[in-house]
Amino acid sequence: MQNVILLPGLASDATIWLGQLPVLATRHRVHVTDVHFRFDTLPEMAAALLAECPGPLVLVGASMGGMLALEAARQAPERVRGIALMGSSARPDTPELKRLRTDAIALFEQGRMEEVLQANTLFAFHPAHAKRRDLIDGYLGFVRAAGAAQLIRQNRAVMARPDLRPSLPALRCPLLVACGEADLLTPVEHSREIAALVPHARLEIVAGAGHMLTMEQPARVNALLLAWLQGLPAGA
């Protein structure tokens, strides 16, 4: 049985893992971390995660959660026995993306969070799911619950993250890299880049999914995760 830590994305919570939790928990010890809500930077979040979750860990991170997983592996490679990335990136923000985040932060500070959230739904899901109220309402629900202050704090944390690509060739633990085929927020090229930098990585492009692949294609994601976890070396 593995100690599997699920790391949600920016402003998200266990909601994005609802399709995975009951399946993974039948075979593994599973915990959803909330360190991204309690600390200001990715290095601080990773240090807290490692302190709060003792022993060897398997990290499964979505989007910002994947960035956090890579940072944890950079800090304590001997502790991290496997990483699965779901729609994530090892790149730092480009100047253009930083400007977009800065503009969004300004709107959050002005109390205009809702207009940003409504616009973001257009980028979060595969076009085939753009009108699925269950997905859209779930997404808007957890982001609204996070609130403007957390959106500001976590966007700033992501903007300040370092370029994690130079550390990737040294990654020795098993790595699963999965991405929705229509991911507009962390495009497939970001996942291909990670997989190319880690020779033993396994790359999976999930059909019929955008950025929120754990919610859009839960059965496919579950199958990928269960097979990957089953294949981890004994003792991981």
Image (tube, grey):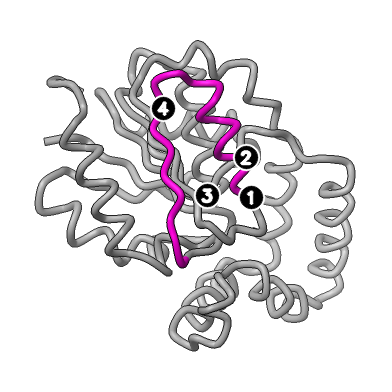
Where residue 185 appears, x then y in whole percent? Answer: 66, 56
Query: Which amino acid lies under the numbered mark 2 shown in the image of this protein?
Result: His
The answer to whether the residues at label 1 and label 4 have Cβ atoms under 8 Å apart is no
Judging depth in this view, the residue of 166 and 26 nearest the camera is 166
Residue 77's disc is none
Q: Which residue is mark 4?
A: 201
Q: Are marks 2 and 1 in contact (CB under 8 Å)?
A: yes
Of helix, strand and loop, which one carries label 2? helix
Q: Which mark is residue 187?
A: 1
Residue appearing at x 16%, y 53% in the figure: 25
Asked if residue 195 is positioned above or below residue 16 in the image, the reply reads above
The answer to whether 137 is drawn above or below residue 165 in the figure is: below
Query: Considering only order in the chain, which callout, 2 or 4, is on the residue closer to the N terminus?
Result: 2
Indicate which disc residue 87 carries. 3
Q: Residues within 10 Å of mark 2 (few under 14, many from 20)?
A: some
Magenta region: which residues? Answer: 186-208
Specify whether 84 is left or right of 88: left
Asked if 125 appears above or below 196 in the picture, the reply is below
For the residue marked with disc 1, what is the amino acid? Pro
Q: Is residue 196 magenta?
A: yes
- As measured in the structure, the alpha-carbon distance from the residue carrying label 2 to the one carrying label 3 is 9 Å
| Disc with the residue nearer the chain's start (3 vs 4) | 3
Question: In the picture, which quadrant includes the C terminus?
Answer: top left
Q: Earlier in the sequence, mark 1 or mark 3?
A: 3
Q: How far across and down, in percent of the image, does residue 48 sit? A: 46, 32
**Residue wearing tag 2:** 190
